[in-house]
C-alpha cells in the first residue's frame, strides 16, 4: 500500500462580519471540496498548499500552519491510502479568482450553512465544522 499525501486549506474571508468559505467542484470527479493537491518533490506541506491554491484559484495566500490543522485519511479504490492535510488561509477583500478549468468546474464563496450543505463528503463537513468553531473564537 502506498500513502498519497495532499495538502490544502480552508480558504476563508470575512464579509460584513460573516465568515465565507471558498469551495471548488472537481472537474474530474465532480465532488465539492477545499483547494488542495499533491505535495511535489521536496515541498513542505505549506508550500504545496500555497502552490495548489494559487494554481487552482489564482489566489496568492499565506497558509497558517501554526494554530490549526486537520487531517483526513481514507482508502482509495486503487488500494492506496490518501492523507489530506488541511490548514487555514484567510483572504482579504474580494480578490479576483481565476479557476483552473482543467481541474475545477465551479468555484465560489459560501456562507457556513451553504458550504456545509454543498460539501460532498462527510469528513469535509466535519473539517468545516471544526474550522467554523475555531474561527468564531478568534
Image (cartoon, grey):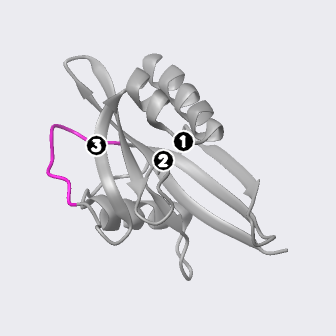
The image quadrant of residue 38 is bottom right
Residue picked out by circle 1: 120
* Residue 68 image offset from top left, x and y in percent: 56, 38
- Above or below, 60 against 22 in this view is below
> Is-magenta flag for residue 68?
no
- Above or below, 67 against 95 in this view is above
Who is closer to the viewer here, 23 or 105? Answer: 105
Numbered disc in front, either 1 or 3: 1
**What is the spatial separation of the Cα atoms under label 3 and label 2, in whole angstroms?**
11 Å
Whether residue 93 appears in this view of the structure is yes
Q: Residue at x 27, y 42 (%)?
A: 91
For the residues labelled 1 and 2, say whether their Cβ atoms are less than 8 Å apart: yes
Residue picked out by circle 3: 108
* Residue 64 image offset from top left, x and y in percent: 45, 46
Secondary structure of the magenta portion, mostly? loop
Which of the marked residues, 1 or 3, is nearer the chain's N terminus? 3
Locate the N terminus by quadrant.
bottom right
Locate the C terminus by quadrant.
top left
* Residue 18 image offset from top left, x and y in percent: 29, 19
Who is closer to the viewer here, 107 or 52? Answer: 107
Instruction: Find the magenta span and give its range.
Output: 90-98
Element under disc 2:
strand
Residue picked out by circle 2: 33
* Residue 128 image offset from top left, x and y in percent: 52, 32
- Above or below, 40 against 61 in this view is below
Amino acid at each position: 500500500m502506498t500513502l498519497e499525501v495532499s495538502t490544502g486549506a480552508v480558504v476563508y474571508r470575512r464579509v460584513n462580519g460573516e465568515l465565507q468559505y471558498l469551495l471548488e467542484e472537481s472537474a474530474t470527479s465532480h465532488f465539492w471540496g477545499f483547494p488542495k493537491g499533491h505535495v511535489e518533490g521536496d515541498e513542505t506541506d505549506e508550500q504545496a498548499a500555497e502552490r495548489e491554491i494559487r494554481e487552482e484559484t489564482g489566489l496568492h495566500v499565506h497558509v497558517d500552519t501554526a494554530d490549526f490543522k486537520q487531517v483526513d485519511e481514507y482508502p482509495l479504490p486503487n488500494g492506496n491510502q490518501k492523507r489530506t492535510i488541511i490548514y487555514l488561509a484567510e483572504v482579504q477583500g474580494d480578490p479576483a479568482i481565476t479557476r483552473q478549468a482543467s481541474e475545477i468546474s465551479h468555484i465560489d464563496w459560501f456562507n457556513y450553512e451553504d458550504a456545509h450543505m454543498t460539501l460532498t463528503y462527510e469528513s469535509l463537513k466535519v473539517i468545516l465544522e471544526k474550522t467554523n468553531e475555531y474561527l468564531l473564537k478568534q
